[in-house]
Image (cartoon, rainbow, N blue to C red):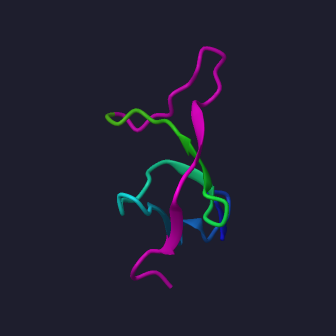
Amino acid sequence: MYLNVNDPESSKYDVIDLITSFRIPGVQEANDETGEFTVIMADLETDELILNPTGEVVKFQFKGYIKIVKKENTK
């Protein structure tokens, strides 16, 4: 399954790390068939996005063992 935060249904899903069983915060897009996902960085205290010196949002691309799961109690 592919998930992107621009999809109106994306708030109904979480991306889970299958090794730790924890939700991965800040995921902007994910594909659990390929294991690829992109995470943006935000300040934990202010929740503001972290920008690099050129003003772009800092983001990292990863490949791992992930699963996109529907949150409980969502319709």
Please report the residue visible at 45 percent of the width from the left and 36 percent of the height from the top. 42
Point out the residue furthest to the left here: 45
Nearer to me, 20 or 47: 20
What quarter of the picture does the N terminus occupy? bottom right
Q: Residue at x 35, y 58 (%)?
A: 20
Residue at (36%, 63%) from the top-left corner? 21
Q: Position of residue 2 (x, y in %)?
A: 68, 65
Up/down of 27 relative to 67, above or below: above
Say which residue appears at 66% left-offset and 66% top-offset.
33
Residue 60, quarter of picture: top right
State the image coordinates of residue 70 (x, y, percent, origin top left): 49, 76
Residue 67 spot, x, y in % from top left: 52, 67
Q: Main secondary structure of the magenta part?
A: loop
> Magenta stretch: residue 53 in it?
yes
Task: Answer above or below: position of 49 versus 38.
Answer: above
Q: Position of 69 compared to 29: left or right?
A: left
Q: Quadrant of residue 3?
A: bottom right
Counting every numbered tag in the picture gives: 0
Q: Which residues are magenta?
A: 46-75
Q: Quadrant of residue 45?
A: top left
Q: Is residue 7 magenta?
A: no
